[in-house]
């Protein structure tokens, strides 16, 4: 648990699974409900984090452990500057990626030692874990098709190759079942249908905040 008064919600899933789209729709709902909220994305969300994002997504090649530490450097700044203050103020934080991404991409994808990745995450986050992580599940070809239809080019991590991405997909399947406070949701179908599933899950988990107004 976050240990603060707010609620820390994370959207996870492979590229094109709809995290950013669904975070925006969730923001609209929170707006309607009159619930104060913050949207964050990783890597990024602070001045330092956005500079690190450029290096990570558009820079040259780097060792896996460098990638891990840059991701976590950005996250530690985001937590200090944005997430912890928002939670302390009682807000709902909706994060587009968090530690499940680190385990999936740097742990499984880059094949770093998982125990070390977990220790590094704990160091960077001070042990702050989400109240709920929602994993949006779509088949990988579906994510690719969405990216191409959206005419977005590949970033450095998306260019990492088929075997890398196979490991990431498998990791999400595994982690969705084994990580605490984590649920999988069907990410297929129209954005509004996916959003309805997200709202239903939030109403179920946090009835006091999301007062049964799902859909
Ligand atoms: N349910 C959906 N059906 C069809 N297209 C969608 C759906 N949700 C999102 N899209 C489109 O697919 C593309 C990828 O969606 P989005 O950017 O939300 O995914 P993402 O998980 O944030 O991806 P990334 O990890 O690359 O940031 C966008 O062009 C978006 O408009
Ligand atoms: Mg996105």
Image (cartoon, grey):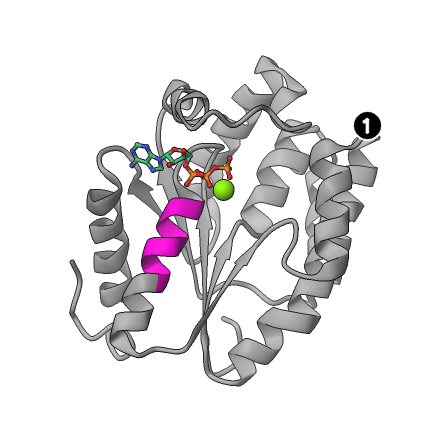
Tell me if I can see residue 125 in this picture.
Answer: yes
Image quarter of residue 106: top right
Residue 55 lies in the magenta-colored region: no
Q: Position of residue 80 (x, y in %)?
A: 70, 72
| Residue 46, percent from left and from top | 69, 61
| Residue appearing at x 60%, y 79% in the figure | 85
Q: Main secondary structure of the magenta part?
A: helix
Q: Residue tagged by mark 1?
A: 60
Residue at the outermost top position? 162
Give the answer, above or below, for where 81 lies relative to 116: below
Task: Work out which quarter of the rendered image holds the C terminus and state it.
Answer: bottom left
| Residue 119 visible within the image | no
Magenta-drawn segment: 20-27
Relative to 158, 34 lies left or right: left
Image vertical order of residue 198 relative to residue 178, above or below:
below
Where's residue 142, x and y in %? 36, 23
Left or right: where does residue 23 sit relative to residue 110? left
């Amino acid at each position: 648990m976050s240990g603060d008064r707010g609620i820390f919600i994370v959207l996870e899933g492979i590229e094109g699974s709809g995290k950013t789209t669904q975070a925006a729709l969730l923001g609209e709902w929170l707006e309607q409900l009159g619930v104060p909220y913050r949207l964050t994305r990783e890597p990024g969300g602070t001045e330092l984090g956005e500079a690190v994002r450029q290096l990570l997504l558009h820079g040259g090649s780097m060792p896996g452990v460098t990638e891990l530490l840059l991701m976590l450097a950005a996250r530690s700044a985001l937590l200090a500057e944005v997430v912890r203050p928002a939670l302390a103020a009682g807000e709902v934080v909706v994060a587009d990626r968090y530690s499940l991404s680190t385990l999936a991409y740097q742990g499984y994808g880059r094949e770093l030692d998982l125990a070390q990745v977990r220790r590094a995450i704990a160091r960077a986050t001070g042990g702050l874990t989400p109240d709920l992580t929602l994993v949006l599940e779509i088949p990988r070809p579906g994510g690719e098709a969405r990216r191409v239809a959206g005419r977005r080019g590949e970033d450095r991590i998306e260019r990492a190759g088929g075997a890398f991405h196979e490991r990431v997909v498998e990791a999400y399947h595994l982690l969705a079942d084994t990580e605490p406070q984590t649920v999988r949701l069907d990410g297929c179908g129209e954005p509004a249908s996916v959003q309805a599933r997200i709202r239903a899950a939030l109403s179920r988990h946090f009835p006091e905040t999301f007062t049964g107004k799902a859909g």
